[in-house]
Amino acid sequence: MIIEPKTRGFICLTAHPTGCEQNVINQIKYVKSKGAINGAKKVLVVGASTGFGLASRISSAFGSDAATIGVFFDKPASPGRPASPGYYNTAAFEKHAHAAGLYAKSINGDAFSNEIKEQVINLIKEDLGQVDLVIYSLASPVRTHPETGKRYKSVLKPIGEVFSNKTVDFHTGNVSEISINPAEGDDIENTVTVMGGEDWKMWMDALKEADVLADGVTTVAYSYIGPEVTKPVYRNGTIGAAKDHLEATAFTITDDLKPIGGNAYVSVNKALVTQASSAIPVIPLYISLLYKTMKAKGIHEGCIEQIQRLYSERLFGGDLALDAKGRIRIDDWEMRDDVQAEISKLWEEATTENLSEIGDLQGYSDDFYNLFGFKVDGVDYDIDVDEMVKIPSEA
Ligand code: NAI
């Protein structure tokens, strides 16, 4: 079929298999071009199909020749209905990993559930014995708690007071003022339950209990801090409360892993266009100014550049360069004083009329379409494609 983008607000209902494959190929090429990373050899990535998790899986496989197991929640295609991008990405990843002689298997299901944890443990036991790196890169708006069956929804709200600021509709370039009401009722608790550290700890407890963690295992989860301008809705908001919890959980997990000499870290990553971040008000305007500024300074990075640098310079590069709160900071270039000063100035100036010049709206929009395999250089979208692509290890 001919597949075209069908967007509804910040989501796209279709995805293109060839475009998704090309994205994966580009990421593989990038990692290979940077040379070998002396990293982990048996790697589990939870949230492995898009964004930072996919970049982690690719960096492990093609940087360190690692065997990888990827867990994610994606929709396969049905006749006439394309799969979700993470499904096509994983199909492409496995195809290229297998062609390179690398072990790669995937489990598609709810990572929050006990069943999927059990499936993963059985797969590790059967195929790898143990893993030496666990990347936790889930981003989800909902979580069904495995013990109670209760379904929790996360919200993106400020805490305490209404937050008003500028935002942009990146499809139209329209800059407008938005007001977001503060969290109420169980909003904070629910968001912490979905995006905090409880499930990460449950994964590590289950893996440790099953003796599938190698001595000296490392686990890493991803967090975000960001600038003053997004603080009320991000770091000081409900999602920030969840990130505080996630970051605190790293210390608990490190204590739990002491008997096997393991460590848990949080890496604070850069703001990037992913399905998760497109949903957060105000962030798209910030990202479009950030991209413009960082590209002008020659320091722009995407997910793959971020994770390649995280692995080669920090995790496996001998210098974690932890901050005062014990976090790895791969958002260091985003948070540079000169970058933030420039964005603060641009933020004040930004209007519908000038944003396409002072911000990188085009870059934002292109990245958004790229997430779904559209507008990818070198892909001919007029060619009929088979939407029924399968993930090799699932077929
Ligand atoms: P993403 O939306 O691209 O990826 C999320 C992954 O989680 C996908 O593989 C998806 O299939 C999987 N997933 C979601 N629900 C699942 C479930 N119930 N079971 C199994 N898999 C599930 O997100 P992104 O942006 O890569 O986020 C990953 C982490 O990085 C998050 O913790 C996020 O907060 C963090 N981060 C994101 C930044 C950004 O700007 N995008 C910046 C800094 C950190």
Image: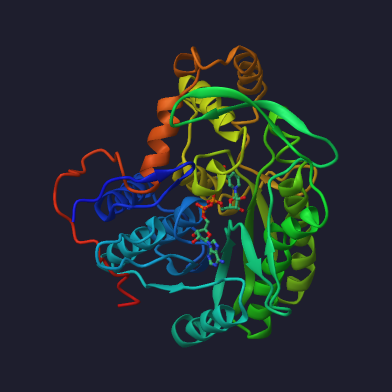
Side of 315 where 200 appears, left or right: right
Give the residue displayed 48% in from the left and 41% down from the top.
Answer: 9
Rendered view: 208 above or below 310 = below
Give the residue displayed 36% in from the left and 42% down from the top.
Answer: 370
Image coords of residue 105 (percent x, y) = 40, 74
Image coords of residue 96 (percent x, y) = 28, 62
Rendered view: 158 above or below 389 = above
Image coords of residue 252 (percent x, y) = 79, 65
Side of 172 where 203 appears, left or right: right
User: The C terminus is located in which quarter?
Assistant: bottom left
Side of 198 where 338 appears, left or right: left
Image coords of residue 71 (percent x, y) = 49, 69
Q: Residue most toward the left?
A: 383
Give the residue displayed 71% in from the left and 69% down from the top.
Answer: 201
Q: Quadrant of residue 75?
A: bottom left
Rendered view: 221 above or below 99 = above
User: The N terminus is located in which quarter?
Assistant: bottom left
Total label count? 0
Between 347 and 42, which is closer to the camera in this rendering? 347
Between 84 and 312, which is closer to the camera in this rendering? 84
Rendered view: 354 above or below 220 = above
Would residue 11 be seen by someone viewing this image from the given angle? yes
Q: Residue most toward the right?
A: 160
Between 274 and 258, which is closer to the camera in this rendering? 274
Side of 163 where 218 appears, left or right: left
Q: Quadrant of residue 101?
A: bottom left
Give the residue displayed 77% in from the left and 72% down from the top.
Answer: 256
Would residue 34 be seen by someone viewing this image from the given angle? no
Task: Name the image colouring.
Answer: rainbow
Rendered-image quarter of ligand 1: bottom right
